[in-house]
Amino acid sequence: MNYTRKLTIALAGAASIVLAASACSSEGGKQETAAGGADTPELTIAMITHEVPGDSFWDKVRAGAEAAAEKSNVTLEYSSDPEATKQATLIQTAIDKKVDGIAVTLAKPEALKGAIKKANEAGIPVVGLNAGLDHWEELGLTEYFGTDESVAGEAFGERLNEVGAEKTLCVIHEQGHVALETRCSSLAKTFDGDSETLYVDGASMPDVKSSITSKLQEDKDVDYVATLGAPYAMGALDAVDNAGSDAKVATFDTDKNLIGAIQDGLVEWAVDQQPYLQGYLAVDGLWLYNVNGNVSGGGKAVLTGPSFIDKSNIDDIKVFAEKGTR
Amino acid sequence: MSQTLTAREPVSETSEKTLRVGQRSLLSRFMRRPEVGSLLGAIVVFVLFFALAEPFRQASSLMTVLYASSIIGIMAVGVALLMIGGEFDLSAGVSVITASLAAAILSFQLNLNVWAGAGLALALALTIGFVNGVILVRTKLPSFLVTLSMFLMLQGLNIAVTKLITGKVSTDSIRNMDGFASAQVVFSSYVPIPGLGVSVRITVLWWILFVAVATWVLMRTKVGNWIYAVGGNAESARAVGVPVAKVKIGLFMTVGFFAWFSGMHLLMASGVQQSGEGVGNELLYIMAAVVGGCLLTGGYGTVIGAAIGSLIYGMTKQGIVYAGWDNNWIMFFVGAMLLLAVVVNMWVRTQSSKR
């Protein structure tokens, strides 16, 4: 058929362009990375998070977990579901698979209680990461790797005091998320000026931008915009521009683009909880527990943050951020 | 006559086919049932994961799969009935959460026995269904619009009211309140299966019961006939004296009941409820019904089909994890499996009607 032939020609044309363009670029783009490997006993570890699919933050948690897994001859089985009941079901799935260890985020601890108890009964060690600082012990987890959201929020508020901010807009990109609410409320606790919370729809960047823009147009007193995730800081920069406001932007969490923005002085700072480290330590913690009986933290949580990224340390961190690990 | 036993055909095809029903062999009559395609789909999915994923072969894994299916499946019973009756409910996903939040907040704030809170939540869930139904019947707007509005309003109310009352985005725990323990037994306990050494979540048993009751209503009662008639052609149903408005309102309230039941399971499983959940689940319920042979246009389908549709979803979602496939691809595989199931379903239907 005529149509099919046209399609074939078009496809062939496209394929040859791709082939021609596939000569290696030495910079930028996806570069080959070297792989390690180990001859220690093979283990299977399940990591089960409350990730909303496609978030750059979780990419780094996973990258850390995978790096630790590869170094230690561990098969990492990553799965996630933002809904608590479904996350609990995934834990049950891991128990059914008789994995050697489970790393889990406790964003909604109550709902996971039963599943974690079953893992303990099955003799599978469980560690926590990222969310659940107040609950991991009572739930019977062996170790916990993460930050304290309220400590991070308070640190953010104090930093705002240091730079003399007067009115801050705290932008929550997922309505109903406990950790995000904690960040804003803790920020308000230590911050001497006014702080106001703004809810935006994190699934839609145009909405994030236009909501912040309207708010800044309406309220000229805002001199700092605090976002709770790196991509939203970039959106906030646009919004500040559009609104013709003088407000500065600072954020929680980082990503590759944000590092550039800090270096260029567009974003003031980022409070980092080092997601790569969380993923890495959780897998490594389970590995150590399995092969050597080690437990980190001495009964306390192992904190991975908060650490500030700003102009003073950006050059050191940039190298790692470009690899997608910070 | 046998028409009440075999499910109805889409209206356009009925006349010629009813003439031939008497002459059909048992096999071809079986093949003509709406859920046969999805049954084949389910067998394909089961065999696939049975072969690929070693943990899938254990009894305990099967229980996990059944549990995951029942969570979707219980709601799919109500949603399938509604779809056979010719309507949609996009608010079904969040109204589950509304029921759960209402029970938790009312029990905690008013210091009620958990069962009393659950009872008030039931009244609320039925009211939501009633309101959906009445607006639909009165305004004659498509159910898509009516329930889409309800979906958005409930989504907002869930978060706003919860935050207003509790100051947080989740409810206070009702775990140690009176009546919680017994409610947990009813809605969320594990029932040991003698001889197998595993336990089944009680929702699976409830699910089977609900499917059986709904199937009986559809196939053996006057109300069942009404539902098919209203979904097939509301005008001619009205002409022969079927109370169309009451049937539709009743169906929306049935969805409300199942939303309440699912909400109670969520609440009793953990004792707290997050306000932001539930969005998107309505599509899974509709998907389960469609995969199971319900037509988007109404008047055709079965509840057993919707149960098989939920089972396909549960097996796929968990099976992918058991098989250790990359998590990033999960929704793609779920979608592809569902498409496969629907296509097999359609193919079987056209093949069997050719003969």
Image: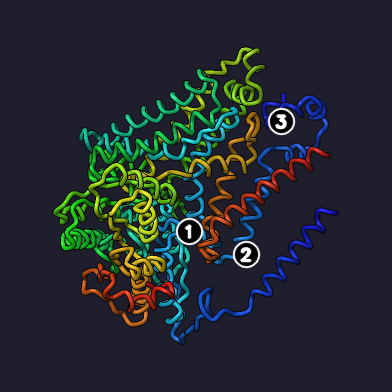
State which quarter of the image contains the N terminus of chain B. top right
Query: What mark, if any, has residue B51 been given in the picture?
Result: 2
| Residue B113 image position (x, y, % from top left) | 25, 35
- Whether labels 2 and 3 belong to a single chain: the reply is yes
Label 3: chain letter: B
- Residue at the right extreme, as displayed: A1
Q: Which residue is mark 1?
A: B60
Element type at mark 1: helix
How many numbered marks have been drawn onto this rendered protein structure?
Answer: 3
| Residue A289 image position (x, y, % from top left) | 33, 77
Label 1: chain letter: B
**Amino acid marked by disc 2:** Ala
Label 2: chain letter: B
State which quarter of the image contains the C terminus of chain B. top right
Decide: few, some or many residues near mark 1? Use Cα within 10 Å; few <14, some 14-19, many ≥20.
many
Residue A23: quadrant of the picture:
bottom right
Residue A115 vs B306, above or below: the answer is below
Element type at mark 2: helix
Q: Which residue is mark 3?
A: B9
